[in-house]
Image (tube, rainbow, N blue to C red):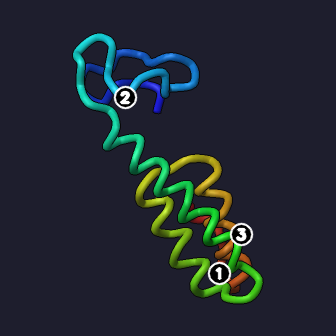
């Protein structure tokens, strides 16, 4: 997360110096929780990619819906390839 979703102030480079926006004091923890969940689900998708590609695809889709990043999109593309789908329309 690079900007506060409330006041749009740019956050520090790592984006996690505080769970509160320094400008508007918005609680950013729920956003961080969603980001963490998306990363966790993405890792779960990678873990089951070989053995259970259909499950991996569903997990990857969920991760992208929660938080669209290059990482979650790449995992989704891998899962699509593994299940025989074309990842061109991501």
Q: Is residue 17 above or below residue 68?
A: above
* Residue located 42% across and 16% down the image: 10
Name, please, the residue furthest toward the front.
18
Q: For mark 2, does the 10 Å Cα neighbourhood hold few (<14), some (14 to 19), or many (20 or more) residues?
A: some
* Residue located 44% across and 18% down the image: 11
Q: Quick one: SS at disc 1?
A: loop
Marks 1 and 3, the one that precedes in the sequence: 3
| Residue 51: quarter of image | bottom right
Residue 3's x, y, as percent? 40, 24
Marks 2 and 1, the one that precedes in the sequence: 2
* Residue located 56% across and 69% down the image: 60
Q: Answer yes or no: do the residues labelled 2 and 3 have beta carbons within 8 Å?
A: no
Q: In this image, 8 relative to 80: left or right? A: left
Q: Quick one: SS at disc 2?
A: loop
Q: In this image, 40 relative to 35: left or right? A: right
Residue 28's x, y, as percent? 32, 33
Marks 2 and 3, the one that precedes in the sequence: 2
The residue beneath circle 2 is 19
Residue 4's x, y, as percent? 34, 25
Q: Quick one: SS at disc 3?
A: helix
Q: Is residue 18 above or below residue 57?
A: above
Q: How many labels does the image show?
A: 3
Q: For mark 3, does the 10 Å Cα neighbourhood hold few (<14), some (14 to 19), or many (20 or more) residues?
A: many
* Residue located 58% across and 77% down the image: 57
Q: Answer yes or no: do the residues labelled 1 and 3 have beta carbons within 8 Å?
A: no
Q: Nearer the viewer, mark 1 or mark 3?
A: 3
Q: Residue 78 got which mark? A: 3
Q: Which of marks 2 and 3 is in front?
A: 2
Q: Nearer the viewer, mark 2 or mark 1?
A: 2
Query: Real-space Cα distance between discs 1 and 3?
Result: 10 Å
Q: In this image, 62 relative to 22: left or right? A: right
The residue beneath circle 1 is 85
């Amino acid at each position: 997360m690079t900007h506060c979703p409330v006041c749009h102030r740019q956050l520090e480079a790592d984006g996690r110096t505080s769970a509160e926006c320094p400008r508007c004091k918005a609680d950013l923890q729920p956003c961080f929780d969603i980001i963490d969940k998306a990363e966790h689900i993405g890792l779960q998708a990678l873990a089951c990619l070989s053995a259970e590609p259909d499950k991996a695809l569903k997990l990857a889709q969920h991760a992208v819906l929660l938080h669209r990043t290059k990482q979650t999109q790449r995992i989704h593309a891998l899962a699509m390839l593994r299940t025989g789908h074309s990842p061109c329309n991501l």
